[in-house]
Image: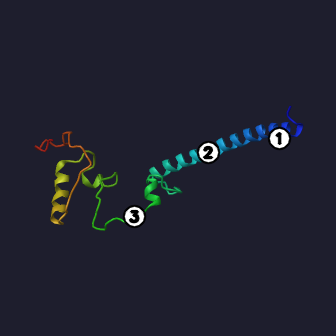
Amino acid sequence: MIPPALGRFIRYWYTYRTVVAVLLGILVSGSMYWLYTQQVACDNQDPSCAIRLSLHPEDRLFFESTDPNIVLVGIDDHSIPALGGRFPLDRSEYAKALKVLNQDAAGAVAFDIGFSDQGRTDDGDNA
């Protein structure tokens, strides 16, 4: 038979354990919701962004400076109006960029885009 003091302790422990589990669940759920909203805010370039989750954790923990000779050139929503107004860009725009990079003695150039679609103009630059 269980002594009364031990029975009371077990009864309180089960109640305590349930309360701790519920509070822990609320804490984890709230943290995940906050992290999700921060990710959405940072992806939308919101100035109220507290942390940047788009970086990989290993990049935040083990930061290593990159070679200053490496340059990434990106085409984003802000640069498309200056390059013709709509996407996909004509292949002549990519050719101009390659000529400039060639004049600047670029060692390697890579495109992260598929050239399978037909260009807007029909001047023989099809893939």
- SS at mark 3 in the image: loop
Amino acid type, callout 1: Phe
| Picture coordinates of residue 58, whole percent (x, y) | 44, 56
Amino acid type, callout 2: Val
- SS at mark 2 in the image: helix
Q: Nearer the viewer, mark 3 or mark 2?
A: 3
Q: Which mark is residue 104?
A: none
The crowd level at tag 1 (other Cα within 10 Å; few <14, some 14-19, many 20+) is: few
Q: Front-most of 122 and 25?
A: 25
Residue at 28% across, 46% down: 86
| Picture coordinates of residue 21, whole percent (x, y) | 69, 40
- Measured along the vertical axis of the image, is residue 122 above or below residue 51? above
Q: Is residue 63 left or right of residue 83?
A: right
Residue designated by label 1: 9
Q: Front-most of 81 and 43?
A: 43
Whichever of labels 3 and 2 marks the residue nearer the N terminus, that label is 2
Residue at 45% across, 50% down: 43
- Measured along the vertical axis of the image, is residue 107 above or below residue 117? below
- Measured along the vertical axis of the image, is residue 9 above or below residue 45? above
Residue designated by label 2: 28
The residue positioned farthest toward the top in the image shown: 1
| Picture coordinates of residue 13, whole percent (x, y) | 78, 40
Whichever of labels 1 and 2 marks the residue nearer the N terminus, that label is 1
The crowd level at tag 3 (other Cα within 10 Å; few <14, some 14-19, many 20+) is: few
Residue designated by label 3: 64
Whichever of labels 3 and 1 marks the residue nearer the N terminus, that label is 1
Q: Front-most of 25 and 35?
A: 25
Instruction: Report the Cα–Cα distance between label 3 and label 1.
Output: 53 Å
- Measured along the vertical axis of the image, is residue 107 above or below residue 26? below
Instruction: Report the Cα–Cα distance between label 1 and label 2.
Output: 28 Å
Instruction: Report the Cα–Cα distance between label 3 and label 2.
Output: 31 Å
